Image: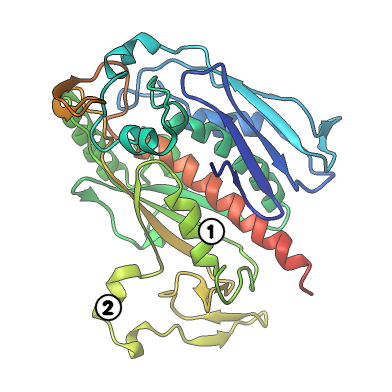
Amino acid sequence: MSNSTGTIFTLTTFGESHGAAIGGIVDGMPAGIEIDERFVQQELNRRRPGQSAITTSRNEPDKVEFLSGIFEGKSTGCPIGFVVYNQNQHSQDYENMRCLFRPSHADFTYHEKYGIRDHRGGGRTSARITISRCVAGALAKLVLRQIGVEIHAYTMQVGNVGIGKDYQKYDLSLSETNAVRCPDLQKAAEMEQLIKEVKSEGDTIGGIIQCVVKGCPVGLGSPEFDKLHAVLGKAMLSINAVKGFEYGDGFDCICARGSEQNDVFYKDADGSVRTRTNHSGGIQGGLSNGQDIVFRVAFKPVATLLREQDTIDMEGNPTVLKAKGRHDPCVLPRAVPIVEAMAAMVILDEYLKNRSVR
């Protein structure tokens, strides 16, 4: 199993959805960084369940407890261990899933690979494991603050309700003022209504999150296999329910000509080299070019439906699944901080690698 990510700034996670706790170990954290535990908790609160009528009703405080690597409020450079205890498991809700495979879940593939699985909430394959990513991402953000890097993710589309790709038209801070986390308040209300309608039908729906990284220095990434967009893509595609990743103009660029797509260079009044457009999404040749890094992540509808679905049991016999429990009708509102966390870990890791080059 691959339970670690990163090269210099690394995260190793542990825990299951209905186990005792979720936790992790962050290694490579620079020493002397002031650890704002309130900020870290706020980032976890953005991901926590039960925060609105359009998320799962599982009621978890998700309180993080640091175990090591911090002394008198600052990082020591040693591994930072942390834990978040599970306190509101309803494992009995999953008893009817013990011997069958849920459609589009990891039940079948996990069982075939390992010969054993924790059926309670998906165990290790549950999205609850992303708690560890949010903690590590918050720590990475604390370091990135010092070099002027800011990361803003928001819900761009839910189902067929969405806003345009041009993020400069919006005040991204407004994303945190509504349950859907969309900077367009009118569209946010439409998205929320759509999610409520889908939920009332016992169904689920997907969408798109856009992320903007501002203040990223030039030269992050490597020209061959570890291109910055490739590393970001791997990080985003490792998030539960993610089905697609694109950066810059993405697939839309196929309809344009090179004369329309090329980002022309110029020298700013302060002597900085910039581009007049940003079709490249802040990455050229696999390296950051100093412009805003812009990418989008597509999430599928949640696989667990609160309605009957045909499936088979572990013996291959046809059966019907009627899921119980508390599930998100749409993951996007709670996935926004996860996308930011993964972006923060990647950018910090690439920045630390880059420091050793020159």
Residue at 41% from the left image edge and 23% from the top image edge:
51
Q: Nearer the viewer, mark 2 or mark 1?
A: 2
Measured as percent of width and height from the top left, residue 65 is found at: 68, 22
Q: Quadrant of residue 260?
A: bottom left
Measured as percent of width and height from the top left, residue 35 is found at: 75, 36
As rendered, which of 85 and 106 lies closer to the eye?
106
Question: What colour-coding does the image apply?
Answer: rainbow
Measured as percent of width and height from the top left, residue 332 is found at: 35, 40
- Quarter occupied by the C terminus: bottom right
As rendered, which of 102 and 264 lies closer to the eye?
102
| Element on which disc 1 rests | strand
First of labels 2, 1 by sequence position: 1
As rendered, which of 248 and 204 lies closer to the eye?
204
Q: Which residue is mark 1?
A: 213
Q: Relative to residue 303, is residue 99 depicted above or below?
A: above
Which class describes the residues within 10 Å of circle 2: few (<14), some (14-19), or many (20+)? few
Residue at 44% from the left image edge and 15% from the top image edge:
59
**Amino acid on which disc 2 is placed:** Ile
Residue at 34% from the left image edge and 26% from the top image edge:
55
Q: Relative to residue 160, is residue 52 depicted above or below?
A: above
Measured as percent of width and height from the top left, residue 251 is found at: 30, 69
Q: Relative to residue 356, is residue 85 depicted above or below?
A: above
State the mark number for residue 254. 2
Q: Quadrant of residue 125?
A: top left
State the mark number for residue 99. none
Would you say 209 lies left or right of 300 here?
A: right
Would you say 276 lies left or right of 74 here?
A: left
From mark 2 to mark 1, how far is it between C-alphas? 24 Å
**Amino acid on which disc 1 is placed:** Val
Which class describes the residues within 10 Å of circle 1: few (<14), some (14-19), or many (20+)? many
